[in-house]
Image (cartoon, grey):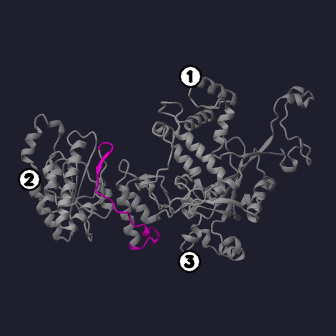
Amino acid sequence: MFIKTVTNNQHYKVSAARYYVVVPDFIREPFVLEDIANNPLEVWLKDHGTDKGFEEAKPIIETLKSKGASSVRAAGFCWGGKVVVELSKVELIQAAVILHPAWVTVDDIKGVKVPIAVLGSEIDHIAPPELLKQYDEALTSQSKRMGNGSGKRRERRVSAAVSVCGVVWSSRSSLLYEEDTEPPAILLHIPLLAEDKVRFCKSYTPMDKSWMKKRRGDKEYFDGVVSFIQFASLHAHGGKILCPCTKCVNLNLVLPGVAQAHLWTNGMLGSYTHWKFHGESVAVPTAPECGSSHVQDSHEQYGDFRGMLHDLCPTHEMAAEPMGQGETAQQPTEVPPDGAQKFYKMIDDVNKPLYAGCTKFSIFSAIVVLFQLKSLCGWTNKSFTMLLEVLMEMLPSDAKLPKDHYEAKKIVRDLGLGYEKIHACPNDCMLFWKENVNLEACPCCKVSRWKTNEASVTGNNASSSKGKKKATKILRWFPLKPRLQRLFLSPDLASSMKWHVNGRIDDGVMRHPADLDAWKLFDTTHLQFSSEPRNVRLGLAADGFNPFRIMSTTHSTWPVMLVPYNLPPWLCMKRSSLILSLLIPGPTSPGIAIDMYLQPLVEELRELWDVGVEAFDASSKHVFQLRAALMWTVHDFPAYADVPG
C-alpha cells in the first residue's frame, strides 16, 4: 500500500480548508505520454486496471477510518473517476466527485449510493454534455427511488452541494476526509481545463452569515470562514477568488486558501453581506428588451457600463418593482425624481444598440469610449465634433450618435462627475465668487484676474478682446452635497454609513474614531445631530504635491479631501471612499491664504450643519434630511501651520 500525505502547493487550497488529503500512488511508476507509441495505453491499462485501483483503495479507506476519520470523500479524474464510482457503489466513501469520467457508464451512475457530483466541460469529447445529462437524469431517478425507501437518504442526496477544490489533475484519485462532519458534504473546487459551462450540482442551502458579526477568535467565526471559502470556491475563476478581507476588500484575486488565511487574520468586510462577487445570486434589474443582448460584447471589452451606472445611481434594483406592489413597495414620492429620471435615461441608452444590428456598442458605451479617446489623445472640442460628423456619415442612417460635442457632453454630464470653476486672484487675495464674480481685477492688489499677452501690455488689446479671456488662476470646486447624497443611493453603502451605530462593537478597543472619547463627547453635546445615525461625520485632509513627473520643476497643487468616518475602518480610508472637494491651483503653495480657497467648502459645511439636504436612503427606501459635521482636520506639521484646525 502506497500512501502519500499531500503537503505541496498543488493541494494547498484543500489543506487550508481543514481537509486531510491523501493521494494513493496507484501508478507507482511515471507514465510518459511521449512513450505512448512504444507503450500503448491499452497495454498500460492491462497492468493498471480500475478494478485494481478499487481493490487497492479499500485498505486505504480502512486505515483512514481506523485513525478516526468519521467520513471519507473521494475525488477522481479520468481513470480515477471510475475508481471513485466503484467505491461509491458499495458506500465505502460518503461523498464523491468525478471529472472527465472516461470509463464511467450510465449504468455505473445508477449504482451510486452516496452524494456525487459530475463535472465536465463543453469541449470534452470523451464525456460530452449529452452524456453528463444522462448521468444527471440517472441520478435524479435514483434519488427518487431511494427516497421512497428512506426519506433521510433522499434528503442527503438532494441537499448535497458538491464541487471540488484544489485537487491535482491526474489519473490518481484523491481521498479526503474532515473530522467531526456529519452528515458528510463535500465542498471543494477543481478548476476545469476549459470554461466550466456544464456543472451538475444538486441544490444549495443558503448559508448562515451570522458568523460575520462574531469576533475573529470565536469558533463560530472560524467555522464560518471555512464555509464561506468552500462556497466561494464553487465559483472561482481560474482557481482564484476575490478576497473580501478588510485589507483586500474584494480587489485582489487570490487562492481560496490565501483568502481564508486573510479572513482569519484581517477579518471579513463587514458591509459585504451580499456575496455577489462569490456566486450568490444577484437580482437582475428590469431593462428594455431592445438591444439587451446585443451590447454585451462592448460591455466586456470596454467596461461594465451597467455596473458603473449602478454605482452612480443604484436605485434601479428597488425601482424595478412597480410601486405599490410587494412588501418593500413605497410611494413614488420616496424616490428622488431628478436622479431617477437621469438614471432611467442612462439605463435606456446602455441597453439600446448604437444602430439596428450593432453587437459591439450601445449609445452610452459609444459616447463614453469616444470621450475616453478624446481625453487620452488630447482632441479639441472642434475635432471631436468633426469626428462625430464623419462617423454619422459612415454609420447606418439609424445610428443614434449625438451630432456635436455639446450634445455628447450633456449626456455624460448626467453621470454627475462635474465641478465648478471659480476664478482666484493671482496673488491669493480673494475669489471672484458670489458678489465678486463680475469683477475684472482684485480690489486688494489691483491685479487683473485674466491672463495677459504682449498686445495687452502695450495697450493694443483690440484683437485680444475679441477672443475668450482666460483666468490666471482657477479653483476647482466639487460640490459636496450631491456626493454625500450619492453615498446613500447604494443600498450596501447606505447600510455601511450607519455602521458606527449599528455595526460597531463597543468593547473598549480603539478600532475607529467612533471609539474615541472625542466622538462620544460630540454625541452627548449635539444630541439632535447624533440622534440620526445617517448624519455624516467628516474629516478634512489637505497637502500639496507636484503633479508633474519632472521633479526639477517646482510646483505645488493642493487637493482638499474629505473622509466620511461613518464608514467602517476597512472602508473609510479606501481611495474609493475619499471625497475630493477642492483642487487648489499652483504653482506655489497657498500658504496662510488657504482659508480663502476653503470658502466654498466652509459655506457648504455650514449649510449642511444648520439645514442639511434632502437625501434618499436606498437601504430603507425613505427620504431623510441629511446633515454633516466636520470632526477633524488631518495634516502634516507644515500644513497645520496654514490650515485652520
Q: Are marks 2 and 3 in contact (CB under 8 Å)?
A: no
Instruction: Determine whether the residue tagged by mark 2 lies in a helix, strand or loop.
Output: helix
Query: Mark 2, residues whose alpha carbon is within 10 Å: few (<14), some, or many (≥20)?
Result: few
Mark 2 or mark 3: whose residue is earlier in sequence: 2
* Residue 537 image label: none
Mark 3 residue crowding within 10 angstroms, few (<14) / some (14–19) / many (20+): few
Look at the picture and state if 639 lies above or below 34.
below
Q: Disc 3 designates what residue?
A: 508
Left or right, 351 with reference to 580? left
Residue 575: x %, y % from top left:
59, 54
Which numbered disc covers residue 394? Answer: 1
Nearer to us in this view, 15 or 544: 15
| Residue at the spot of label 2 | 52
- CA separation, marks 2 and 1? 69 Å
Residue 316 in view, yes or no = yes
- In magenta segment, residue 82: no
Q: Residue at x 6, y 45 (%)?
A: 46
Task: Specify the amino acid type for callout 1.
Answer: Met
Residue nearer the viewer, 471 or 389 = 389
Dominant SS of magenta comes to loop
Type of amino acid at the residue the image marks with label 2: Lys
Local secondary structure at mark 3 = loop
Q: Examine the rendered structure and indicate whether residue 512 appears above or below residue 43.
A: below
Magenta-tinted stretch: 193-219
Q: Amino acid at mark 3?
A: Gly
Locate residue 326 relative to residue 457 in the image: left or right: left
The earlier-in-sequence mark between 2 and 1 is 2
Q: Nearer the viewer, mark 1 or mark 3?
A: 1
Q: CA distance from mark 2 to mark 3?
A: 63 Å
Which is closer to the viewer, label 2 or label 1? 1
Q: CB under 8 Å between callouts 1 and 3?
A: no
